[in-house]
Amino acid sequence: MVRSSYRLVLRSTCNADEYIEDANKRLDWDDVASLECLKGSDAICPICLMPHAVPQATPCGHIFCAACILYYIRNQNEEYVKCPMCNELISLASMRPVAFLPYGQELRENSSVTFYPVIRRHNSRNAYLLENGSSPCVNCAYPYADGAPNQLMFCHVLVSTPHYEYTRLQEALASLKESIDAMQASGEELLRDVALCVQDDLAARLRALEKEHTTLLQPTPPRTVKCVVVDCYTYFAVPYSLSHHLHPLCLQLLRSALPDCLQRGSTLQGTVLQEDALEVTPELLRSNPTLNHLPLYSTVHYLEIDMRWVLELPGLPGHSASLAQKLEERRRQRQRNRVKDKREEKKMSVGIRARREA
């Protein structure tokens, strides 16, 4: 099944509200128009081992170049074939286009990270950016895929529009043309012929959209819905990375020192000291309901950052000392782990040297 870190772009004909309000709803692949995900520095096609050209995703979540997967499927002369990565059955009809998001932060130890304050309605998979103490109404906001990028950074489920599809097709054709030129220069005639077939298919889809819709250059206007008062959560999160959150200890310490830190709408920057990867279980959701936008048994990543500057603020409440003590114990444990790792590494290197000399 598609990874929970992917962002779903659903067809406008399906009931998107069911997916938005239930993180554990079983995904009907026919409801998916396309996917969006962060592009890592090592993102390459598993078939050609090159950067993706017009990336396509399988229902099992693996991403290939359009020409590569088309050639792979056609070469087996079967409607359904096994995925090259996991042996799940796939077909040409089951492939979905993928848009790589350009934004990304290196989330690792000692790297710098920026958290943004967000607001999310209870049981909703979509959160929205808190800007200068205000935000769009989380009840009225509707996640059209061609909406304002700064308000879609924390949404897991989007709804496709003709304007969005038209823009993505144009981008895919431009990317594919560069790949075809590179294939021709390197003499890869067989793969180039397959890529030309993909190009013809994309061009045909683009012409069909132009014929069916006359306002493709205009983004979809916001949808107005009846507003009701509901419970909302506010917290710090990393843009586009749906499972990375500020560590609860850091958030508690920050809120004890600055109770209105989230309402201010300011970003929070810091150096990553430790990352805790936890499985989303019913017990974890009961203790931390802000995670109920994540599917059960997926993974949440808590990032602990350097919070020493908070301890230097005047007038800290008494319970801040216990939070600071917990963070200090985590720091000492990291030091003990580093010493232990160095000892193990030294022991291993001595053993390797002894075997070589023998």
Image (cartoon, rainbow, N blue to C red):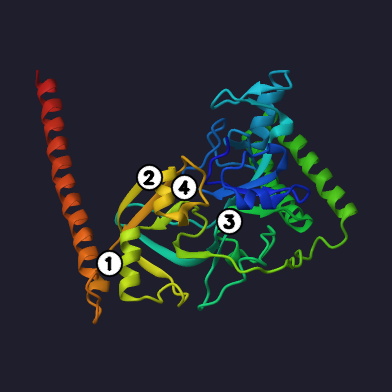
- Between circles 4 and 3, the one closer to the viewer is 3
Quadrant including the C terminus: top left
**Could you say where residue 313 lies in the image, as x and y percent from the top left?**
25, 78
Residue that appears at 76% across and 51% down: 12
Write down the residue under mark 4: 41
Binning the other alpha carbons within 10 Å of mark 1 as few (below 14), some (14 to 19) or many (20 upward) gives some
The front one of 40 and 18 is 18
Q: Which amino acid, by three-letter code, is at mark 1? A: Met
Q: Earlier in the sequence, mark 4 or mark 3?
A: 4
Disc number placed over residue 307 in the picture, else none? 1
* Local secondary structure at mark 2: strand
**Could you say where residue 98 lies in the image, as x and y percent from the top left?**
63, 45
Write down the residue under mark 2: 278
- Between circles 1 and 2, the one closer to the viewer is 2
| Cα distance in 3D space between marks 4 and 3 | 31 Å
* Local secondary structure at mark 1: loop
